[in-house]
Image: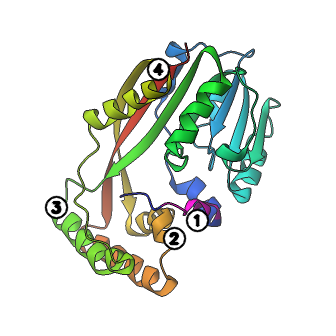
C-alpha cells in the first residue's frame, strides 16, 4: 500500500500494539550485514526510526554503541526501557532530518521499515556524510502480501478495502503485486546516485499466520488505517474480522524482507 506523507505521527499513538504485532527480522539478514561490515565493541552505529525496537537487539549484541533516532516520544521511552541494560544505547527523540550528527563518525547506519519516511534527497546525503570511509548503510523492510493460499478470503478483503478504505480516502483501488527482486535491485542502486559504492541486496521470505483478532490488531498499526475516521475504521475492521472468521478463522501473510547495503568510499 502506498505511503501517505505526513502520517509519521500515527505510529506513536499505538506504540504498545505496534511493538507486539510488527515482526522482527530474520537472523540471516543480520549475518549478511556483519559479513559486509565488521561490527564490534569499538564500532558506532545509528538506527533511523527505531519504532518498537524490532531490529535493534542483534546490533546491540555485537557490543557496539547504538544511537537511535525516533520521532515518537512513546516509542523512544519504550526503547529506553527495553534496552536499559545496554550502556552503549541511547535514543534521540526527533526526526532524523532535523537532528545534527558529526560527519565521518559512524561505522554503520541502519534503518528497518523506516527510511521511506525520510525525503530521499535529504536522507542519502546525510547518511553519506555521517559514515566513516568504508562505513556501511543498511536499509531493510518487510513487505507483506495477502493470503495466496485462500483466494476467496483475499477477494473478500479486497472488496472491503474498496468499500471502506479507498472510499474514505477517495482514492482509486490499487492492484497489489508481491514485492520482487527487481524492486529490491532498483532500491539498492538508488544509493549510488548519492556517492555510495558496492551496492548489493538480498531477499528473505517467511509466512505469518494470524487469528481474526490478531490480524485486525495488526491492521491497527498501519499509519493510513490509524488516520481513518474512527467510526469508519471500526466498521471496516469489524467486517474484516468477520470475513476471516467466515473463511477458516485464520489468515496467512506472505512476507518478503529486502536488505540493501551500500558503502561509503
Question: Label 4's element?
Answer: helix
Disc 2 and disc 3: Cα gap in Å? 26 Å
Disc 1 and disc 4: Cα gap in Å? 32 Å
Residue located at (47% from left, 24% from top): 261
Disc 4 and disc 3: Cα gap in Å? 35 Å
Is mark 2 in CB contact (under 8 Å) with mark 3?
no
Give the image quarter of residue 190: top left
Question: Label 3's element?
Answer: helix
Asked if residue 256 lies left or right of residue 11, the reply is left
Asked if residue 232 lies left or right of residue 136, the reply is left
From which residue to which does the magenta span run?
5-12
Who comes first in sequence, dot 4 or dot 2? 4
Q: Is residue 6 magenta?
A: yes
Residue located at (62% from left, 49% from top): 51
Is mark 3 in CB contact (under 8 Å) with mark 1?
no
Give the image quarter of residue 53: top right
Mark 2 or 3: in front is 2
Who comes first in sequence, dot 1 or dot 2? 1
Disc 1 and disc 2: Cα gap in Å? 6 Å
Q: Residue furthest left?
A: 151
Is mark 1 in CB contact (under 8 Å) with mark 2?
yes
Give x and y (percent) for residue 184.
Answer: 34, 34
The disc placed on residue 32 is 4
Residue 149 visible in the displayed image: yes
Who comes first in sequence, dot 3 or dot 1? 1
Give x and y (percent) for residue 91.
Answer: 76, 42
Task: Give the residue pinned by disc 2.
Answer: 226
Amino acid at each position: 500500500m502506498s505511503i501517505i506523507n505526513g502520517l509519521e505521527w500515527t505510529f506513536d499513538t499505538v506504540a504498545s500494539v505496534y511493538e507486539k504485532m510488527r515482526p522482527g527480522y530474520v537472523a540471516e539478514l543480520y549475518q549478511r550485514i556483519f559479513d559486509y561490515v565488521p561490527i564490534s565493541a569499538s564500532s558506532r552505529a545509528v538506527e533511523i526510526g527505531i519504532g518498537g525496537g524490532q531490529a535493534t537487539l542483534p546490533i546491540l549484541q555485537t557490543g557496539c554503541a547504538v544511537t537511535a533516532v525516533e520521532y515518537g516520544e512513546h516509542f523512544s521511552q519504550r526503547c529506553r526501557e527495553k534496552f536499559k541494560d545496554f550502556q552503549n544505547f541511547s535514543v534521540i527523540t526527533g526526526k532524523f532530518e532535523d537532528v545534527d550528527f558529526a560527519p565521518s563518525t559512524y561505522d554503520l547506519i541502519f534503518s528497518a521499515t523506516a527510511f521511506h519516511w525520510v525525503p530521499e534527497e535529504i536522507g542519502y546525503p546525510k547518511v553519506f556524510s555521517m559514515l566513516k570511509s568504508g562505513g556501511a548503510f543498511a536499509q531493510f523492510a518487510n513487505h507483506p502480501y495477502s493470503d495466496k493460499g485462500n483466494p476467496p478470503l483475499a477477494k473478500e478483503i479486497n472488496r472491503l478495502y474498496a468499500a471502506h478504505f479507498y472510499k474514505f480516502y477517495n482514492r482509486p483501488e490499487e492492484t497489489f503485486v508481491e514485492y520482487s527482486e527487481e524492486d529490491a535491485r532498483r532500491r539498492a542502486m538508488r544509493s549510488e546516485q548519492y556517492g555510495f559504492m558496492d551496492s548489493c541486496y538480498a531477499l528473505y521470505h517467511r509466512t505469518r499466520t494470524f487469528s481474526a483478532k490478531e490480524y485486525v490488531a495488526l491492521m491497527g498499526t498501519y499509519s493510513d488505517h490509524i488516520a481513518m475516521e474512527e467510526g469508519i475504521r471500526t466498521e471496516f475492521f469489524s467486517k474484516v474480522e468477520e470475513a476471516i472468521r467466515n473463511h477458516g478463522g485464520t489468515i496467512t501473510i506472505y512476507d518478503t524482507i529486502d536488505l540493501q547495503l551500500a558503502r561509503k568510499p
